[in-house]
Amino acid sequence: MQLALFALSDMLDTARVYRTTAKKLIADRAAAHAGVVAMNGAGFDGPPWSIRLSPADLDEADYRTIGRAVRSVGVEYLAQWRAAGR
């Protein structure tokens, strides 16, 4: 049910305000937490809703750092969402 409501909300947001804001917040938080720079994936021939987190050819440790930063942002948002009683 929750996924259906989220999908419906996305379809109704024709101006893509929520999607644009969410991508910007995730990119800013990832940069603040671990120096990870996130870019719009559409600029790299990806889907318009995607983000690109690294240029490639990084050391394995760098990918772990990026993964931890992205996970940290997700965990933080989940905690805020739960604290709001949702």
Image: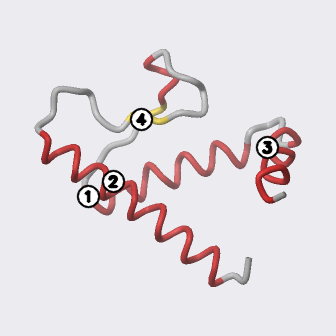
Query: Does 57 appear above or below 7?
Result: above
Amino acid type, callout 2: Ala
Residue occupying the point 48% across, 28% down? 41
Helix or strand or loop: what does disc 4 sit on? strand
Label 3 to label 1: alpha-carbon separation: 29 Å
Residue visible at 47% across and 68% down in the picture? 75
Q: Which residue is mark 3?
A: 10
Amino acid carrying label 4: it is Met
Question: Which residue position is annotated with label 4?
Answer: 39
Q: Are marks 2 and 1 in contact (CB under 8 Å)?
A: yes
Could you tell whether 49 is left or right of 6 in the image?
left
**Is residue 38 shown left or right of residue 17?**
left
Q: Position of residue 34 (x, y in %)?
A: 26, 58
| Disc 4 residue crowd, few under 14, some 14–19, many 20+, Cα 10 Å | some
Residue farthest front in this picture: 1
Which numbered disc, 3 or 2, marks the residue closer to the eye?
Answer: 3
Q: Which mark is residue 31?
A: 2
Split into 4 quadrants, where in the image is the N terminus?
A: bottom right
Label 3 secondary element? helix
